[in-house]
Image: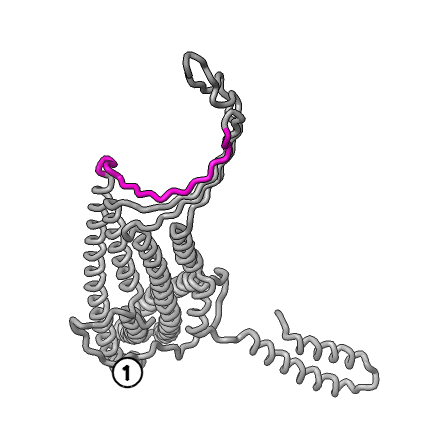
Amino acid sequence: MKFHPASLVLINRIRVLMKSPSVQLMQKMIFFLLICAFCLSVTSQAWSATLTLHDCLQKAKDSNPALKSSAWDPRIAEENVRQVAAIYLPRVDAQAGYTMQLEPQAVMIGGQTAETQEPDYAFAGLSATHTLYDFGRRGARMSRAEAYVDSSSQLFEDKRSNIALQVIETYFGILESEKLIQAASDEVAQVEEHRRVAQVLFEEGVVTRNDVLQADVRLAAARQKLLTMRNRRENIWLRLNFLTGNRSGFRADLDESAAIADIGQTTWDEKLDLSRRHDIQALRHDLRAGESEVVESRSNFFPEIYTRLALDYVQNDKVREQTIMSATLGIKVNLFDGFASTASRQKAVKNRSRIQDTLQLAEQQARLEVDTAANDKAVAQERISVAETAIRQSEENLRINKERYQERVGTATEVLDAQTLVTQAKTDYYQAFYEYQTAAARLNKSLGNL
């Protein structure tokens, strides 16, 4: 067991006092008991911290492995912007080399041969080329890169929202499993008590052994249900630890008062604002990138105006100028590239159309998610009211059947069935209660509020 540092200091003082002969034994024992009580209280406070839903959401935001992986996408997209931005700057190239020829180049003048270069020579060059105007090609390419940055950021936020929803569902799943385990434990205790009563009545010769055997079978079934619930709770804990980045064996007390903020009754219609949904925003940025791609592909059919500054050196002592400086203002246009530009244009147009249809589908699915979550939330709220009444009725039914059986008016089967009804009523209530919470979370998620 681990102790708080303050507890260790006080324990050391106890040891010193215990060794002092001037202190009476009774005083030592009283002081020792008081300090032990203090240590236990400090230790319990140190280890009984409640894990809230907000804590889980924050841990998932900071440590979820899927979010860590997705966080690189916006950063990579930002580097793509820097890469595309390079087209606005001049391109500077340098080259150098040494050429060895079998024979130097020569010319014929009046029947005489005159060499115009050396057989072996060194050369070097430095050039700067800059595009002056390309009919919007660079601007479209830059706009597309920036749109992909925005899209990547929205996709990351959508991923974070999905992880948050999974954390909420898992958190309430653990709370629900705890309640179901308690209901199953109560059923086991009730069946054990019924089995004890049946055994007493059997020994008195009032009932047959069949009542005891029936109670044994029902007790085994109740214990199996309890084991199943505990196993389910452990699996949900493993999932929560994975989502929040905790070790698999981590366990803590959860806040049973956790609840999702109720957004109230809202009317959904065709004019539902989906601008807060990150997935919709990501597709809208993708559409903007697709439109920029269409503009860029269209510019491939237009010429490009450029300028070039160059400094070229060729080792050749047979000529006067070995270093040539030049400045060029030119225009270039592609005349034929095997219909590659045409295919690129058609591809960009069709890709834009695909994104438009995908965006329309996503908006329709978003409205469906909102309607479904709102409907589930309303039905779960009604189920809670029905289940609360059913619990009271089932407990009263169990009380009546127990009294009837003990008075030897009712049967063992009626008691066992009544116990099962109590467990079922409690199970229905807890499921409805936590389904209401998860439905509220899904509604917030579908509206882009999570």
**Quadrant of image for the C terminus:** bottom left
Residue 341 x %, y %: 24, 42
Using the image as rendered, state which of residue 394 and residue 417 is in the foreground: 394
**Is residue 332 found inside the magenta-colored segment of the image?**
yes
Which residue, as the protein is rendered here, is positioned at the far top? 111
Residue 240 x %, y %: 42, 64
Residue neighbourhood size for the residue with mark 1, other residues' Cα within 10 Å, grouped as few (<14), some (14–19), many (≥20): few
Q: Can residue 270 be seen in this view?
A: yes
The picture quadrant where one finds residue 31 is bottom right
Question: Is 192 left or right of 276, judged from the image as shown?
Answer: right
Which residue, as the protein is rendered here, is positioned at the far front? 110
Q: Is residue 184 visible?
A: no
When the figure is inspected, residue 73 is found, relative to residue 111, above or below; the finding is below
**What kind of element bears circle 1?**
helix
Question: Is 32 left or right of 158, judged from the image as shown?
Answer: right
Which residue is rendered at x = 35% and y = 44% of the image?
Answer: 329
Residue 447 x %, y %: 27, 71
Q: Mark 1 points at which residue?
A: 392
**Is residue 449 found inside the magenta-colored segment of the image?**
no
Please, what is the three-letter code of the amino acid marked with disc 1?
Arg
Query: By what rule are the colours in the image chosen?
Result: one colour
Residue 385 x %, y %: 25, 81
Q: Give the range drawn in magenta.
A: 320-339
Which residue is rendered at x = 59% and y = 80% of the image?
Answer: 41
When the figure is inspected, residue 234 is found, relative to residue 207, above or below; the finding is above
